[in-house]
Amino acid sequence: MHSVPYLSLITFLPILGMIIVLALPKTQGRAIKSLTLLITGIQVIIAIILLINYDYSLGGIFEQSSFQFVEKWRWIDIDGFSWLGKIKVDYFLGIDGISTPLLLLTAIVTFIATLSSWNINKSIKGYFALFLLLDTGMMGVFVALDFFLFYIFWELMLLPMYFLIGVWGGPRREYAAIKFFLYTLLGSVFILIVMIGLYFSTQETLADGTRVFTFNILAMMDTNNFTPNGILSPLNPNNLRFIAYIALFAGFAIKIPMFPFHTWLPDAHVEAPTPISVILAGVLLKMGTYGILRISYPVFPEITKQLIWYIALFGMINIIYGALCAMAQRDFKKMIAYSSVSHMGYVLLGMASMNTLGISGAVLQMFNHGTITAMLFLIVGVLYDRTHTRDMDAFGGIAVQMPVYTGVVTVAFFAAIGLPSLSGFISEAFVFLGAFAVDLIRVLTVISISGILLGAAYMLWALQRVYLGKLNEKWASLKDLTFREYAMFIPLALIIIFLGVYPSPMLDLMNSSVNSMVKFMADAQVIYSSFGGF
C-alpha cells in the first residue's frame, strides 16, 4: 500500500481536474460538472481504500513510524546565509487516527457539495475550477506533517473561498467575502509568525549528522530538538512560548469560529451559495480544531495544561451564546449558521478535558457535526431553490406537500439535537463524560449541558414553524425531492444513523492516536516541569 502515493493522489487529483476544466470550452457546462463529480467521487474511493487498509494497532502522534501512508522527500534544500545554515522543507504527508476521519469527511462532503452545485449556471467554468482548488487545500491540511506545507494548504483555501462567496453568493456577497477574507488572513498572520519562531527554535539531525532548522511538526514536539537559545524553545528561560501559544491558538480559533471571533461566519453562510455553505460548515470549521490538536497541543503541552479552564470556558460560551443567537433568528440559514457556532463549542469542551474520553468525543463530534450540518444546509438550500425565501415565518405545513423531504429534515434536526440512536448523541455524550471527569472544568461542563435544551428549543421551534400546521397555500405547488437530491441526502442520513447505532468503527479508528496524545500530554507535564514550564 505504501508504494502507491495515495495521499498525494487524494490531495492533488483536484488540481488535475482544475487544469482540465480550464482547458474545456465554457459552453461545456455539463461536461465540467460531470468531470468535477468524477474527481470528487474518485477521492471518496481513495478515502475508503485508506480506511480499509488502515492499521488500527498503530498509534502515536510524535513519531513518523506511528503515521501511515507516509510520503516524505526533500522539497526545498538551499544554503542559507551565515547563521541560517541549510534551509530545508520536506514534502511530508501522513495520516493517523485523528486526521483519517477528517480526510474521509472532506471526501464525502466535497462529493455531496458537487451534487449540490448542479444548479450553478453562472460562470460554470470559473466556479468549478475554484471549487477543485479549494478541494486540494482542504485535503492538504489534513495530511501535511511539515508546518510550511501545512501553511501553504491552509492559505490555499483562502483565495477560492473568497471568490466562491464574493461572485456566486447572495445580495451582500462582497461584504461577506471581504469579512471572511480579513478575519482568516488575520489568523493566518498569527500562525505564520509562530511558524517562523518555531522554525528557528527547532533543529533535527540529518543522515549525515548535520543539524538543521526544521519545519517538521513531529520534530517540534520533541524537546531534544529545541535549540537552547531559540526564542520559542522551552530550554530558553526568557522564551515567549506563552505569547506564541495564544497567537497560534487565536489563528486557529478564528477558523472554528470561537467567540469572539465568530462574527464572520453567519454573514459568510447566509451569502454563500448552498454548496459552499455545506463545505464551509462541514469541513472548514474543523480545520481550526484540527490545527489545535495537531500543532498547538503537542508543540506547547505545558501551556495547554495551564489554560484548559479557559479553553473550556470559551467552549461553554460558544455552546450557550450560539444556541441563544440561533433561537433569535428568522432566517433559516442564519439559524443553522449559529447552531454551528454552538456545536463547535462541544469540540472545544471535549478538547479541554485532556483525557481519552473527552478528546475522542471531540474528534467524533468534528466528524458528526460535519455530516449533520452539511445535511442541514442542504435542507435549507432545497427549500430556497423552490421558494426563494429563507424567512421561517413565511412557511407552514410544508410536510403536507413534501413528506419525504420532511422525513429527511426530521433525521437531520433530531441528530443536531442529540437524540439517542443518531450520531450527534454519541459524540456529545463522550464530550460531557470526559469533561465532567475533570474537577477544574466540572462546573463549566454542567452549565454547557443546558446547550442541549436550547438546541432542542430552536430546532423544534423551526420544525413547527416551517413544516407543521396548516399548509400555506402559497406553497401548494411545491415538488418533493428529485433523484439528485435523494443522492445528496441518503449517504449523509445513512452515516448519521449508522454511527448513532454503532459508533465503534470510528472510535476504534481514532483510539490509538488519542490515547497516545493523552499520554504524551501527561508525560510532557513531568518533562517540562524540569524546565520551569509549570
Image: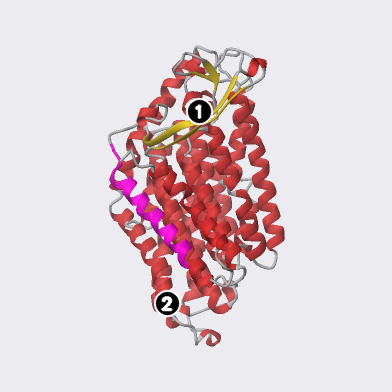
| Residue at screen point 55% across, 58% down | 131
The crowd level at tag 2 (other Cα within 10 Å; few <14, some 14-19, many 20+) is few
Depicted 346 relative to depicted 528: above or below = below
The reply to whether the magenta stretch includes residue 50 is yes
Range drawn in magenta: 34-56
Between discs 1 and 2, the one toward the N terminus: 1
Q: Can the viewer see residue 456 in this picture?
A: no
The reply to whether the magenta stretch includes residue 268 is no
Which amino acid type is marked by label 2? Thr
Q: Secondary structure at mark 1?
A: loop
**Dominant SS in magenta:** helix
Mark 1, residue position? 216
Residue 225 coordinates in the image, percent (x, y): 50, 18
**Residue 424: quarter of image:** bottom left
Q: CA distance from mark 1 to mark 2?
A: 48 Å
Mark 2, residue position? 482
**Residue 65: quarter of image:** top left
| Residue at screen point 54% across, 19% down | 212
Which amino acid type is marked by label 1? Asn
| Residue at screen point 33% across, 34% down | 512
Please give left or right for residue 192 compared with residue 451 in the image.
right
| Residue at screen point 49% across, 67% down | 33
